[in-house]
Amino acid sequence: MLSAIQYRLIAGAIAACAWAFSAHAQAQGFAAVVSPPRFELSVKPGSRVREVVEISNASPQSATYHVRTGDWTLGADAGVTFLDRLAAGSCRPWVAIERRDIVVPGGGRYRYRFEVTPPADASAGECRFALLIEGDEQMVKAPGGLNIPVSGRIGVIVYVTIGSAAPDLQIVGTGIGEANGRPVPVLQIRNAGNAHGRLTGFLSGVDATGRTLEFTPSTLPILPDETRQIPLVASTAPDTPTDISYPVRVRGTLEWGAGKRTELDQVFAR
Amino acid sequence: MSPCVTASHLCLLLVCALALTRAAAQDNGPDAAPDYQDRLIDDGKLAPDVSQDMYGGNNPEGWPRAFRAQLSAGRVTRNDAAPNETGLVLGGMLDTPNYGAFTIDANFRASNSDAYGSGTLFTLSQRALPMNGGWFGNNALGVFNTPSTDLARQQYRFYMPTIPTLGAATEWRRNGDLQLNASVGEPGLYTGIFVPTFESLGGRVATGGLQYRFSNEWAAAAQVAAVNDVALGTGPSASLGTTSARSLYAGTGWGTANARAQLNFVDSAIEDGSNQTGVWFDAGGRTERVYHSFGAFYLSPNLVWGNQPLPSNIEGAYYRADFQTRRWMIDGGLDYVAPVSGPGSATLYAVGNVRYQYLTGLGIGGGANVLEGATNAWSAFGYVDYANPWGIGRAQINYATDSQQDSTQLTIDQSWNPGAGTNLSTSLLLGHLDSGGASANSVGVAVFGTLPLGGRLTLSANARWTKAFGDLPSENVLANLALNWGFAPGWMASLNYYESRNTGQIPLVVTSPIPTLTPVFVQQLNDRTVFLALRYEWRGGTPSVPLSGAAGGGFGSIAGVLYLDANDNSRLDAGEQGAANVTIVLDGRFSARTDAQGRFEFPAVGPGEHVIAVVPDNLPLPWSVAGDGRVNVQVRVRDQTQVDIPVRQLR
């Protein structure tokens, strides 16, 4: 758990973010482009998996980036908090990275390698960590004449399934929540498995006005032993969100994991 | 499992970029100095896999500016001739805060071929020149395609051409409500093989246009073009003589968020005194889930736009309906076409397609086309799309028949997930053809992909090979390979190989009888080209003022491929060709040109919503961009947005 002062510091950092980027031109900025933004890998205990993350420098000047691993937590609001210190049960000792500092030429691309080697006696589960790519600190002049150093950081989330680990998603509750300012049906999803899972699938329903609606479950990750609210966003045409007149009955098949399905037939009322 | 490879995935919730103050970090105690040291692969002795600087120079002062030069030399083997071509392509850009963005292009080509000769091309253009009163101007000097009003350009079924011209052009736009354009010069043709240059047809062309938007819904436009003493062809076609003509386009359009209608009128008079008229009406509207499009047309014989032909001697009507949910896509339509005068008979064409997404990773679909008239033909296809551990696959079977042949083809496509920086699609093709009492079986493979061979060397390939056995033996090859080597800052060497060989029948395709605008694109069937290019790029200026963004607002990039979507699945499959040498415009201000494989890139674009527009002037017909050729793109800071834009054949 984060301490209160850590929460305040993270909030301060986020608040500083907009201001720091508004000073982008002065500071010559952080122009790294990282691909892919997420890895989902699998490996057997005692084996090794090696991957490449591409770090591109969109500025015309050479840039130095510092790369390290970090643990992370996912908040109830789906915000990610990165932790530098080794968290309890962290799998980062299984991870090896290419080097700690890299130089990427202007407009250039660096294919950065990392690998994960779980020990032979590792039990089935999921190794989760982040690759943190940080720029050099830049001095930014703050109101009042203070010079404050800032640095940009990108976190790439890595999931590694060890052995036979798999999610086990269960609907443990339903209700009305909010997404993008709209009241929407939500599912309380518990993950009783030992790997993260995400919901997809095709749902449809008819609201109180008789309109036929399509519903799309949010693809937020549901981590093992976690219960998370998953909003069902309604639309009348693909990718056109719409308001709902309650009550609404939603039916269809939820998909998750490797070919797993859960039937849903639920009335949501305010 | 494979890593997710597209930045558009909703991984962003788990990817954040924070600017952290040192003060905060210091207060954060142990987090500022991590007490965990990562292990290093091979003790940190892995050789870096890093590309060379993409740009020479790194002066951050001044306005954003860029310069590029490319020297190329190659040899073409075509129809028993093997001409050499040497070319120099120069280009530059300067983005000014008060005078818009200037671009300059200059091409020089030397060839020992009588057919292609030598040539040059020069264009100086200025886009988005800001003026008082909400006006913006676009100007061009040199070689350009004559400007048009939006109403003339944004056509649903018939495409109004523009005229390649050497001269001067200007276009003024005010707050989206008023457009004026004019151009004058000498019309011509684009020629060349690797390096496009311009060949004059002589004579004169003058164009002018006006569009006014009366309200949010209504707009009207008029456009005129006049040509005098313009040759009807070059080289062996020079003996066809010259033409002089006057053409007028007038149109009015109405549109809301869910409906549109447009009435178009064309009148053309050729010097022999004949006056021809065309009128067509297009409309469309959305009910809750169905979009209906319909229209009618009357186009008298010998209609022209300046020296360019227009669809002529047809009258008829069409209707299309598209139904779409997340799970279902159904479309269908009817076309009726008859000649206005002369021989020929009416033709009726019906088309229908359906797709059902059974599961997130499993979709099935099919369709059919029927043509009845002077020629009777029909075709049908069915497919299954499936996600698998290696990527996305598709199995499709096509059948087509007319009075002379029956053809069946099975295609297995697979888009692979090979890892960061690499993409790969493959296809396996099996076919059977019966024609005039003879028959043949065929087999083929296709591959499309990009493979980094170490940080500075990249191989791109788009190749297709088919071979037929039996009574109708044939071998078809279409290959486009490029090996790129970034060997020094700003420098790139590339070796390109292209081969197109077709010794057999072209597969039967049943399409709408509504004609496309100009003579159908003639694919070169017996080409083999090898060329070597040496390129230098230099960029300077302040990079934090991105294209269409604000200073200090950060930027991302847009990259993509404009491709000919042969199977209409909106996905770039192996064997599908890129559309080369087509202009892509970002927010109406910045332009890029697709390379030989249809690729384009805007490397630094401000975050937010942008519009990419495909200028279809150089698209091979009968291909056209869906809709109005505009794609809305969301750019995120420090992210690359991949936009693969399909162009389709009207069915």
Image: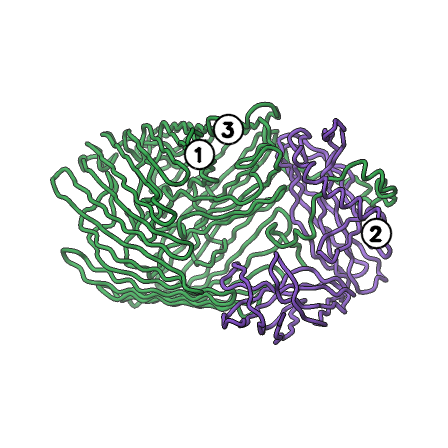
Q: Secondary structure at mark 1?
A: strand
Indicate whether B88 appears above or below B362. above
Disc assigned to residue B74: 1
**In the rendered image, which quarter contains the N terminus of chain A?**
bottom right
Q: Residue furthest front?
A: A270
Would you say B226 lies left or right of B589 here? left
Residue for point 43% across, 45% down: B579
Instruction: Decide: few, some or many residues near mark 2? Use Cα within 10 Å; few <14, some 14-19, many ≥20.
Output: few
Q: Give coordinates of residue B542: x percent, y percent.
A: 59, 28
On the image, which quarter does residue B17 sit in?
top right
Q: Are marks 3 and 1 on the same chain?
A: yes
Disc assigned to residue B95: 3
The hue of chain A in the figure is purple
Disc assigned to residue A2: 2
Would you say B76 lies left or right of B560 here? left
Point out the tag, 3 or 1, that comes first from the N-terminus: 1
Residue for point 34% across, 52% down: B156
Q: Give coordinates of residue B32: x percent, y percent.
A: 84, 40
Nearer to the camera, B608 or A32? B608
Instruction: Decide: few, some or many residues near mark 3? Use Cα within 10 Å; few <14, some 14-19, many ≥20.
Output: many
Q: Give coordinates of residue A248: x percent, y percent.
A: 57, 72
What whole-number distance in Å separates the C-alpha atoms at marks 1 and 2?
A: 64 Å
**In the rendered image, which quarter contains the C terminus of chain A?**
bottom right
The reply to whether residue A21 is in sight is yes
Chain at tag 3: B
Which chain comes out green in the rendered image? B
What whole-number distance in Å separates the C-alpha atoms at marks 3 and 1?
A: 33 Å
